[in-house]
Amino acid sequence: MKIYIRFIYILTLLALGTVAQTQSQPNLPAINVDTLCNLGLNKAEKAKGAFFLSDGNIITILNKTPLIIDSKTGAILRQLDSLSDPVVVFPKLSKDGRYLIASSLQGLAIWDVVTGKIIKIITNASGYCFSNDGSKLYVTTANSDNLGTVNVYDMNTLEPIERFGALVSGLYIDISPDDQKLALSAIKAPESENDLKTNQVILINLNDKSSLTVLETLELQANSIKFSPDSKQIAFLHSGKEEYLNYIYIMNLETKQKQYIKLQDLTDIFGFKVTAFTNPLFIDSNTITFEIFNETYDKHYCIVWDINANKIKNIINFEYNQSVDIKDNDILFCSFSGVLAYLKKDIVDVNSNSNKTNSCIKYSNNQLVYYSEKAFSGAAQIYDVSGKLVADLGAQTFSEGRNVIPVHQTLPTGVYLLAIITSSEQISGKFLLE
């Protein structure tokens, strides 16, 4: 399977179904995914997410039914028991790949992936997550008459064993990869009739469950909650009544530094009215991905965001992404229409996205000298350290050994990246202009 990568600078053609739309984008690199399969759902049906299983194959939920997909051919290998109602909240898979959970109007369903059977339905469940060792299931409730928001189930017996958290109700929940903390969006009891901010994002120490830390107090609930892979950061989506209250929130739990990615800021960058964005999903500890769109004009972008730099890294040509899962160097995407696609993790960042890094690059007299180990053809571009395209050098033919590439413009002093894109790989290397 080959990964085809293209940088597109002025126009991006994105598709909804099979209809292509032309739209402008900022001067950022765009990356194409490698499509595994298209399960071809209609608008009444929606895929809810996809995950890698321990054997390397994929499990996905389409509307009511989980399917096992061959990760090499995209063929459907088998299906699990179907729910009577469609899934309404995103599914989750235990780390060992044994159990799948998803919520519908029927309740929170737990599947045994090996047998394909639904082994339990939990009613009155809002949010849910597995402990990382797979032994426990944490479930939040939305019953304002029943204090004790987090219920813990033993996955061996499927029975509740503990309840904690004196909150009115809880919604989204996630557990840190080190199994030390729970984060959840919750509703507290109002302190007075004028208390409008009754929604909170709370951190619970699992070594001392009475230890609750309020990270943020909101007028409306957080729409999601997610830990970074290193357990050091939390991200969630907040959709408020006013435009300025629509943002993605990121907090570093060690430094307490907060970051807000606002709709208005993205509107300024892209040049069209950004009306909404999707839940942030971590690709790695410093990188999230989310979608922005304006449904009226059918404009969509899948954004890759650098948390440390507080800016967009690049754009992924994939629409309506529902989930992100990672196995080794493969990132798995799932669209609501049932498209499953791969992206290599090491090509997400333009500053380190090479399949092969070459340091034999010299610059002098407005030309680059590049040493190649083989003969090939590719498109060459130069980026500055911020990821901005500064020179499009066009198609080039390279011979084995020394190659001279005219630049035809004067570059300021600084560090630059030469990227050469072929049909099967990207070669990149930095050079210094003194």
Image (cartoon, helix red, strand yellow):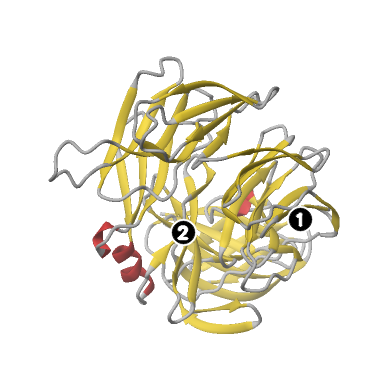
- Mark 2 crowdedness (10 Å alpha carbons): few <14, some 14-19, many ≥20: many
Q: Where does the image place residue 150, in percent across and percent down from the top left?
A: 46, 29
- Residue 345 vertical placement versus 124 (above, below): below
- The residue indicated by pointer 2 is 278
Identify the mark nearer the N-term, 2 or 1.
2
Quarter where residue 405 is shown: bottom right
Q: CA distance from mark 2 to mark 1?
A: 43 Å
Give whichever of 419, 120 is nearer the camera: 120
**Which residue is painted at 57% across and 68% down in the image?**
319
119 relative to 239 in the view: left or right: right
**Which residue is painted at 46% across and 37% down in the image?**
141
Kindly give the residue lying farthest to the top in the view shown.
208
- Residue 319 vertical placement versus 158 (above, below): below
Q: Secondary structure at mark 2?
A: loop
- Residue 201 vertical placement versus 403 (above, below): above
Q: Secondary structure at mark 1?
A: loop
What number is the disc on residue 373? 1
Going by the numbered disc 2, the residue's amino acid type is Thr
**Which residue is painted at 62% across and 63% down in the image?**
335
